[in-house]
Structure formats: C-alpha cells, structure tokens
Amino acid sequence: MKTINLDYAAASPLDKKVLDKMLPFFTEHYGNPSSGHSLGEMPRKAVAEAREQVGSLLGAEARDIIFTASASESNNLAIKGLIAGGKKKGNHIISSEIEHFSVLNQLKTLRKQGFEVTLLPVDSDGLVDPEELRKAIKEQTVLVSIQAANPEIGTVQPLEKLASIAREKEVIFHTDATAAAGWLPLDLKKTEVDLLTLAGDQFYGPKGSAALYIKRGIRLVPQVEGGIQERGLRAGTENVPAIVGLGEAARLAHESLTDRSEAIAAIRDELKENLLTRVPYMHLNGHPDKRLPHNLNLSVEFVEGEALLMRLNMAGIMVSSGSSCTSQALKSSHVLAAIGLPPELAQGSLLFTLSERNKVEDIPYITEQMESVAALLRNMSPLYHKFLKEDQINA
Amino acid sequence: MPDYSDKVMDHFTNPRNIGELSEADGTGEVGNPVCGDMMKFTIKVKDNRIEDVKYLTFGCGAAIAVSSMVSEMAKGKTLEEALKITNKQVAEELGGLPGNKLHCSNLGADALHKAIEDYMEKHGIKSASAT
Ligand code: FES
C-alpha cells in the first residue's frame, strides 16, 4: 500500500546531504574537539563551521550560538538559566497560553517557587496582541518568552513587534523558534531578541540537534554543569555528528528558504482547498495567512480524532490530532482550548505537517480518503445524527 | 496510536450493529467525563429478550470497538443477563485494552444498561440488579 506521511513535524527523514556530511564524524573524524592532539582538529573545525552556519541562518554571530540536544533543553537553559542568574530585579515572567510544554512546565515550577507568571491569551486565530504584552510588563518583569510560530495551529506571531516592546521596556525577550526556524526568515539583526531556541530535526537535520542563540551580554547559568564545552554553558562532550548535521541543515535551509517555503505552501494550500471544498463541515484552525508554510490544522466536525487517525492510517495516510483521546494524559490540546475552539471540534482536529517529500499528485487520494473516512465515522456519530435531525426540523 | 489487540482492531475496522433503531423500546445515552466522548444505545425487546440493538459512538478506536462488542454480547440475551454484562467482561472479550483506554469500556456497558433501564421504567418493571 501507498503511504503518505503528513506528520513530518513529528519526525522527518534527514536530507541526504546532511547525512553525507555527518557520516565521517562517526568513524573517521571521531575525535574529541577538546583533545590537544591532531585527532581533535577536524571535529573542532567542523563544530566551528556548524556554529557559523547556524549563526548565518539567524543573521547572528557564530559565537552567540550554543549547541544543545533538544529544543526542550534550549528552552530550559534559556528560562531556568536566566532566572538562576538573575540579579532579582523582580519575579514576574510573561509568556503565552500556547507555548510548548517545555516552556509552560518550567513556568509552572517557577510559579511554585514564588514567581508570578502571566500567560497572555491569544485571539481565535492564535495571535498574541502586542498591546497586551505592553500592558502586562511591569517593574518586576524579568523575562518575556513567546514562541515565533505555533507548531500545532501554525500561527506566526508578530515577533518583531513583540520583541521591540520588550526591548523598549528593557525586559529580556526569549523566543521559542523551534517550529519557525528553517521555514520563516529570521534575521536577528532586524528582529532583536535576546534568546532564541531552534532544533535541527524540524528542518531535515538530525534528531538530538538543537541550539540556543544568546545575545552578547545576557548571563545564563548552565543547567548541565561539568566541563567547559560550549563556553561553559553546557557541559558534556560535543555530539559532533549531530552538530555537523545541524550546521549543514541550517546551511541548506538558509540557501533555499524562500523557494522551499513557497513550494511547500503551494502544496499545503492545494490540500487545504481540496479538503475544505470536498469534505463538508470541516474548519480551519489557526490563522488563515499568517501561518507556517508546511502546517495545516483542520477540524472534522462530529467525529473524534483518534478514530480518524486510525482510519486514515489504514489507508496509508499519517496525521496527528489534538483530541484528548490521542493524548496519554487524556487531555485535549491546550492550544486549541486557548483559541476558544469548542471541545467537540478540538476532538475532531487533525494536524497535517508537510515536507518536501509530499507531492501534489497525492492530494486527490488524500481528499478521497478523507471524504470516505469522515462519512463513515459520521454515520456512527450520535452528534451527526442529532445535527441531521435538527437540520430537518429547521428546514 | 495505542497498541490495540487484534480483536479491538477487528471491531474498530468492521463495527457491528451501527445505527439507531427507529422505534426503539429503550434508549440509553452516556457521555464520557474523562475525555468528552459519547455513546447512544437503542434496543428492541421481545419476550424479555434483547431482540435487536444498535448504537452510535463519538469516540476513540477503543470506544468504537467497545460499543460494537457490547452490541454483540447483548443481542439475544434476557434483560437480566444483559444487565450483568460488566465493563471488565467487555474489555476481556476484546482481548484487553491499553491502560489509559480502560475508561472507554465503561461507556459501553453503561449505555446499554441505561437503555435497558429505560425500557424497564417504561414498562413498570423493577430490577434489583440494575446498576
Ligand atoms: S473515548 Fe476518549 S479515549 Fe476512548
């Protein structure tokens, strides 16, 4: 059977060029960058090159980039690392309701430790209102952390505006750009943020490769203590192959960012149009235009997401869902709740994330399958039958 | 996707007895407080036996398999027998359910029992074993 992956945000295959670049560092150039002898030389150079490449993707200097093993780790170093080193100007932190759990859960912990946390709401498209941020900042505010784009509903925040308000008020600004990096142009010369998180596996780099941009002058306390790797901010022998892979993925993304994004957005839009016109009672979640080029989030009314996901999987189509039934904790998506989506629609939400492997030729098949799966599940849905009855009465 | 047994996958893929009986003798509807899903059972009763049973389900793969299994288990049983079907039995018949999906099996037997109780109430039958 044909398989069509539409869940690339969960995991993407490596770009072949990335893999080729990484391979020698497993076997040939396996040395430790910290070694004084010649075996350390190649790896050391390769790590330095990767740092340049990640810097270039962001319009930043190589020396401002710290390598970590995941976006979650970068977020932890940014937030906990900053708070731990803070000179106690205050104890107020601002973030948004739709952040990743690696931000939200830290804030929960900090709250328990006596910090005051303001989570800014978002509108029904998922946007943070910059004026709300302005109003929320007070004398005691030490940090603002707002993501660049949301991985689930795809909404892209007005980052430049948000960052400039924080700068104006002299508050440190962190952005979790995990979903955005490699897809949206991020130029830190124009958008001045203090801390930025990114991960290589979101743009065809290896899993376990990530980075944190730290603007010069920002003091962080390491969250992994030990040796002096990564300027003493992150101890542990460098994962050279992963770092090399991240660097190469960043170079490739930087090289063709606009073309890549436009090409994928064209397929995504075609898929969206087809699904919304052919399958009745479907709704778009997230912002109609200000969204990640490879992201599509739709709710299929009257049916539940896990059942949809399983049926589509049987047809060879892989997607994910924000339904409570698909989550281990049986909680539906906090992001969909924050945009005010009614619970029944959150239950029927489907997340499609595309990659350059997706083909426009597959769209008719996907649409056909969505049509029949939605019809089949609606046929056994008490909500749908109720709706039909009410519809008849109203007609 | 959780690791479902072959039995669960079979009932999910080919659910038996889907629908709503137009002139039902008893109707039972339940919502799942854990995740917000719902099930509706309708039954036809003849000579104190469940002659026909149909259901509608809004829920996960396990919930759909559970309703299908419950409908099969209930068909042909006397009301007393059907009232004794437990959530545990349903899960066992399905070859087990993943831990965090056990709550979905509560929905099935509950909705069936409600439909039977509805019938009994309408016909003035009292049942000691009603749950
Ligand atoms: S019905 Fe929601 S987890 Fe089963």
Image (spheres, coloured by chain):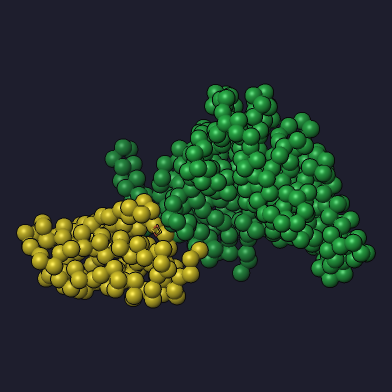
Chain colours: A green, B yellow
Query: Of residues A321 and A88, which is closer to you in this image?
Result: A88
Q: Can residue A179 be seen in this view?
A: no
Q: In the image, what residue occupies the spot 34% across and 41% down? A: A391
**Image side of residue A155 versus residue B99, left or right:** right
For the question of whether residue A88 can be seen, the reply is yes
Quadrant of the frame with the C terminus of chain A: top left
Q: Where is residue B5 in the image (x, y as percent from the top left)?
A: 44, 74
B49 or A167, which is in the foreground?
A: A167
Depicted A287 relative to depicted A380: above or below: above
> Position of A253 compared to A162: left or right?
right
Residue A172, quarter of the rendered image = top right
Relative to A192, does residue A64 appear above or below in the rendering?
below
Q: State the image coordinates of residue B104 (x, y, percent, origin top left).
A: 35, 62
A153 to the left or right of A247: left
In this rendering, would B124 be left or right of B68?
Answer: left
Q: Residue furthest right?
A: A38
Question: Residue A288's spot in the image, x, y percent?
Answer: 59, 36
Whole-percent x, y for residue A197 in the image? 68, 45
Image point 74% across, 41% down: which residue? A214
Seen at 47% across and 56% down, the residue is A327
- How many numbered marks have been drawn onto this rendered protein structure? 0
Point out the image quarter for the N terminus of chain A: bottom right
Query: Which quarter is ligand 1 in?
Result: bottom left
* The one of B111 and A53 positioned closer to us in this rendering: A53
